[in-house]
Image (spheres, rainbow, N blue to C red):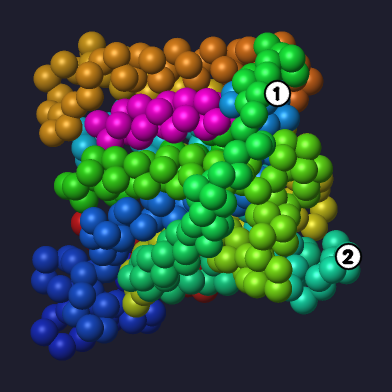
Amino acid sequence: MTKTSTPTQKDGRVGANRHRVSQIGTESNSSGELRDRDNKKVGLGKKITLLRGISIITGTIIGAGIFISPKGILKNSGSIGMSLIVWLACGVLSLFGALSYAELGTCIKKSGGHYIYVMEAFGPQMAFIRLWVEFIAIRPAATAVISLAFGQYILEPLFMPCYIPPMAVKLATAIGITSVMYLNSMSVTWTARIQIFLTFSKLLAIAIITVPGMYQLFKGETRNFENAFDLHNMTFSGMPLAFYSGMYAYCIALVIIPPALRTMPLAICISMAIVASCYMLINVAYYTVMSAEELLASEAVAVTFAAKLMGNFSIAVPLFVALSCFGSMNGSSFALSRMFYVASREGQLPEVFSMIHIRRHTPLAAVLILYPMTMLQLFVGDIYSLLNFMSFLRWFFIGVVVLGLIYLRYTKPDLHRPFKVPLFIPVVFCITCFFMVFLSLYSDPVNTGIGFGISLTGIPAYYIFLHFNQRPKWLQRALDSFYRTLQIILEVVPNEE
């Protein structure tokens, strides 16, 4: 990829003690290390403790999904009993996936999540396709959807019981997206601290729903569970879509803790246990208060639940849902910036995306890379059509990642693995993912076909942008000038490991 010269290399001056000082506030010592004004080495912040790791994983998983997916699962599974089985199966499957990712994260000592795992197992071409699909389809759509849920619920108390204008929702959504990007650009520490607060806020929201629901259950409100396993409405073609809704709510692979955290397996296991318990309890609470017909007729399940049980206090529920969505936006942005940062270090994105802000120690360019695409999806595109095949793309490539774990077991048996899962766990997870993905060809061939098409565009993109790198000199000069200008504007410099 194009290499950009740093301001320290080009515009530096010699200061006291023979240190070279750049015009953007860094200096290099006698050994060549870049230091900021506080004499700290310029590098990517790694202030992730066990508690923060749990909060980031839990905070990213528990988002809009738990307030959206119950309707999709019930609709496609056909009964209350089957929907609870799907929730439980998705929890077990997600735990298997999380444990598989824990092994990959502890034996591959690089940040980057999905991307770097595919790179290590299957090489740069498959990793680039994974990155390409993530960039143009999965992440913009997913971020826009969660952000729109935030915009809808944050305005709900202001407009209740009136209709919220779509433009007002989009403007509130744009403000939410911008604030998340700003937060992740300014401080790794504050991003993690706020994520802890948002995680406890969303757990409080779940408690507000779960505790009254369980109280009603213990009082004997069980009429909605009669004939819970009536399978007349269950269809074979609907089950993959039910699992898609369930796995969307879990989203186990959106966040992977940086490998510097030695307790990553413990953080993942604790997080998945918390999430699975919360999801099962909150769904039982829903069904205790609402019948299947009422849940299917609701556009906002949590709001309908609160209105039936809490009266005037129900106005607080949309605010807690909005905080939950904001936590997912924040955690996703934190993880994605690391993936694009690593992709740049591997030479598959311009070098400026692996540079670090000289004072904030954050990968500023990597944080901002998705901002234009997400805003475009928000204001111009119909993101809901993307949702139909987003799950196909996401779980296909998650299956590829875990297949890479199995492949590495045989190609690199001597690789140091501080944490190693039994082989049947990744095998079961991988088979289930691919079975679910390819069964969706029967359930929803149109959107699945579109997903295949988007994946295939990564092949010519790889050869255009990476393989054939002999560009005209005028174009190369223009790109070099653009990247240098961007580097100066953002005040970023190469990371000093």
Q: At 40% across and 28% down in the image, what residue appears? A: 92
What element does badge 2 sit on? loop
What amino acid is at disc 1? Answer: Gly
Answer whether residue 93 is magenta in the image.
Answer: yes
Q: Quadrant of residue 199?
A: bottom left
Horizontal side of 6 relative to 84 (left or right) equals left
Label 1 belongs to which residue?
78
Which residue sits at x=81%, y=43%?
A: 297
Looking at the magenta stretch, what is its main secondary structure?
Answer: helix
Depth check: give the residue in front, 26 or 413. 413
Q: Position of residue 399 (x, y in %)?
A: 46, 22
Mark 2 vs mark 1: which is more N-terminal? Answer: 1
Question: Does residue 431 lie above or below 126 as drawn?
Answer: above
- Residue 489 spot, x, y in % from top left: 52, 73
The stretch of residues the image draws in magenta is: 83-103
Above-or-below relation of 409 to 204: above
Q: Nearer the viewer, residue 133 or 167?
A: 167
Residue under the image location 77 percent in, 76 percent down? 158
Q: How busy is the neighbourhood of tag 1: few (under 14 within 10 Å), some, or many (20 plus)?
A: many
Name the residue tied to disc 2: 163
